[in-house]
C-alpha cells in the first residue's frame, strides 16, 4: 500500500472517475438508443425496421417524411402546439415572477398562509386533478365563457399546473437579492412595481429563462390536458395528433416513426439551444459578481 502514497493526486482519482464515466456512458446509451431508433426508423421502410432496427439506413427512404410534410393536418397541429406553448410560457413566467416577487420581497398579513396554498398544489399532480378541473371548466362554460374544446382552455389549465413549482423556484432567486438594494431603491422613490420591473427582473433573468424553457418543453410534450379538453381534430396539438396517428396507422411503424420524429425535432433542437440557460439559471445565484 505504501507505494501508492507517492502517486500524484490525479492518478489516485482515476478509479473513481472511471466509475463515474462508465455510469454516465451507460445512462447516455439508454437515453439515446430510443432516439436513434426513432430517427433511423423515420427514413426506413417498415420491413427494414422489423429486419434491421438498429442499422443505419442506406440509402435513406424519404417518402415517409415527404408524406407527413404534405399533410395539411400536420401543419395545423404544429401551429396549435406553437400557440399553446407560447401562450402557456408567457402566462406562466409572468404570473410566477410577479407572485414570487410578492412572496419574497413584500410583507403582508396572511403571507405564509397563501404561500402554503401554492405549495399544496405540488401534492396534486395533473393526472389526479384533471377530472375535477374538467368539471370546473364545464361549470365555467355554462356561464357563457367557452372553455371545453378550445385552445384557451388548454392554455389556462397548463398554466395552472405550472404555477406551484415555478413560484417556489423563482422565490428563492428573488429572496437572494440583497435587501440593501431594495432599501436603496425605495429611498430613491422607486415603487414596488418599478423595483420589480427595472431592477429585479434583470437580476434574475437567467432564472426566468430557465423556468421559461422548462415550461415550453413541458407544454409542447403535454398530452393529457389536450386529450381531455379538445374534441375537434382541427384543434389537436402534436402529442394528441401523434396518439391518434398511431391508432390510425398502427401497422406502418416507419410512417409512425416519421410522424413522431418530426413532432419531436423542434423540442430536441430547442433543448440543445436552451440547455446552457436551463442549467445556469437553475444553479447560479440570482446576483452575480
Image: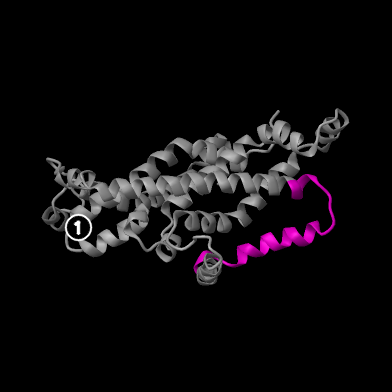
Farthest residue, direction front: 144
Residue 223 rendering spot, x and y as whole percentages: 41, 59
Residue 169 rendering spot, x and y as whole percentages: 64, 49
**Quadrant where the C terminus lies?**
top right
In this view, 60 is above or below 140: above
Callout 1 crowding tier (Cα within 10 Å): few <14, some 14–19, many ≥20: many
| Residue 184 on the magenta segment | no
The answer to which of 85 and 30 lies nearer the viewer is 85
| Residue 112 on the magenta segment | yes
Q: Answer yes or no: is residue 16 visible.
A: no
- The answer to whether residue 249 is left or right of residue 108 is left
The answer to which of 236 and 167 lies nearer the viewer is 236
Instruction: Specify the quadrant of the image occupied by residue 150.
Output: bottom left
Total marks drawn? 1
Q: Residue at x 67, y 35 (%)?
A: 201
- The answer to whether residue 4 is left or right of residue 192 is left
Q: Which residue is mark 1?
A: 253
Q: Secondary structure at mark 1?
A: helix
Q: Residue at x 88, y 30 (%)?
A: 187
Q: Answer yes or no: is residue 51 visible.
A: yes
Residue 207 rendering spot, x and y as whole percentages: 61, 40
Q: Which residues are magenta?
A: 102-127
Dominant secondary structure, magenta: helix
Amino acid at each position: 500500500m505504501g507505494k501508492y502514497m507517492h502517486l500524484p493526486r490525479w492518478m489516485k482519482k482515476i478509479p473513481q472517475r472511471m466509475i463515474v464515466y462508465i455510469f454516465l456512458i451507460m445512462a447516455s446509451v439508454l437515453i439515446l438508443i430510443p432516439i436513434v431508433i426513432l430517427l433511423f426508423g423515420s427514413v426506413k421502410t417498415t420491413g427494414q425496421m422489423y429486419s434491421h432496427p438498429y442499422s443505419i439506413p442506406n440509402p435513406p427512404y424519404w417518402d415517409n417524411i415527404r408524406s407527413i410534410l404534405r399533410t395539411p393536418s400536420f401543419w395545423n397541429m404544429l401551429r396549435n402546439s406553437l400557440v399553446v406553448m407560447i401562450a402557456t410560457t408567457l402566462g406562466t413566467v409572468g404570473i410566477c415572477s410577479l407572485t414570487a416577487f410578492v412572496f419574497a420581497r413584500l410583507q403582508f398579513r396572511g403571507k405564509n398562509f397563501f404561500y402554503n396554498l401554492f405549495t399544496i398544489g405540488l401534492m396534486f399532480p395533473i393526472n389526479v386533478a384533471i377530472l375535477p378541473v374538467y368539471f370546473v371548466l364545464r361549470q365555467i362554460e355554462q356561464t357563457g365563457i367557452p372553455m371545453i374544446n378550445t385552445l384557451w382552455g388548454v392554455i389556462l389549465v397548463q398554466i395552472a399546473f405550472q404555477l406551484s413549482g415555478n413560484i417556489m423556484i423563482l422565490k428563492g432567486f428573488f429572496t437572494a437579492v440583497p435587501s440593501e438594494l431594495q432599501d436603496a431603491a425605495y429611498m430613491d422613490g422607486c415603487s414596488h412595481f418599478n423595483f420589480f420591473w427595472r431592477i429585479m427582473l434583470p437580476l434574475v433573468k437567467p432564472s426566468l429563462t430557465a423556468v421559461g424553457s422548462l415550461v415550453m418543453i413541458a407544454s409542447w410534450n403535454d398530452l393529457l390536458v389536450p386529450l381531455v379538453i379538445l374534441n375537434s381534430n382541427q384543434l389537436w396539438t402534436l402529442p394528441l395528433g401523434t396518439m391518434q396517428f398511431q391508432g390510425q396507422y398502427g401497422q406502418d411503424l416507419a410512417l409512425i416513426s416519421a410522424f413522431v420524429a418530426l413532432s419531436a425535432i423542434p423540442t430536441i433542437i430547442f433543448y440543445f439551444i436552451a440547455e446552457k440557460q436551463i442549467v445556469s439559471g437553475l444553479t447560479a445565484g440570482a446576483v452575480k459578481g
